[in-house]
Image: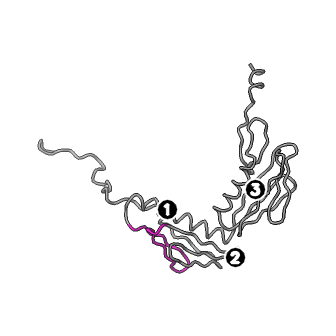
Amino acid sequence: MSGNEIPVSVGVAERVPPTEKPLSRIGRQPIPLPSGVQAEVLYGGIKVTGPRGEVIQRYHPEVNVKVEGDQIIVERMTERKFHHSLHGLTRSLIANAVVGVTEGYSRTLELMGVGYRVQQNGAGITLSVGYSHTVDVFPEDGLTMEVEGNNRVHISGVDKQKVGQLAAKVRRVRPPNRYKEKGIRYQGEVLRLKPGKAAARRAV
């Protein structure tokens, strides 16, 4: 090396230019369509039909969605950061719709507390959770609510978002009390119970 040459750091020549951003790892994956599932691209959305029902998933107009053979392809329009974020999000939402019409989604809630119980009320449920009155909750179309015993509720449907929203609505009727171990919680939900002031003073 002559005295006029400037040393080049290792790896500089291999750097990706700023304009060449990598594809979304989620968005670039095609969505396979299982046997018995059909997809149709609509204006501003896609309709997915399967053995368990039908889901119409809306998506942002600045994302391109197309059906090629037995798979769904999601493409972004530009390399802007906004389109990068839409790419993976749209792919995930459509993939959830495919799973919903083939396997379905479900959430289970459990009632904690002495005297807390739930009863089937037609398509909905009636909750007795410590209030002076009972609370009725009914599902919208496409969702089902099933009572197991007197302290467990199963919510199921093909739309993942709607199942989650209804489960959250039931939980809000009486959220878990971290001091008294009472309320409505998701099955498997871990609660960090607190001892309360009296127990804390006794422990000192």
Is residue 98 located in the magenta-colored stretch of the structure? no
Residue under label 2, please give it: 51
Q: CA distance from mark 3 to mark 1?
A: 28 Å
Q: What count of labels does the image hold?
A: 3
Residues packed near mark 1 inside 10 Å, few (<14), some (14 to 19) or many (20 plus): many
- Image location (x, y in percent) of residue 147: 83, 59
Q: Answer yes or no: do the residues labelled 3 and 1 have beta carbons within 8 Å?
A: no
Is 9 displayed left or right of 79 in the figure? left
Dot placed on the residue nearer the N-terminal end, 3 or 1? 1
Secondary structure of the residue carrying numbered label 2: loop
Secondary structure of the residue carrying numbered label 1: helix
Residue under label 3, please give it: 108
Residue under label 1, please give it: 88
- Image location (x, y in percent) of residue 55: 63, 72
Q: Which residues are magenta?
A: 60-77
- Image location (x, y in percent) of residue 165: 66, 58
Q: Main secondary structure of the magenta part?
A: strand
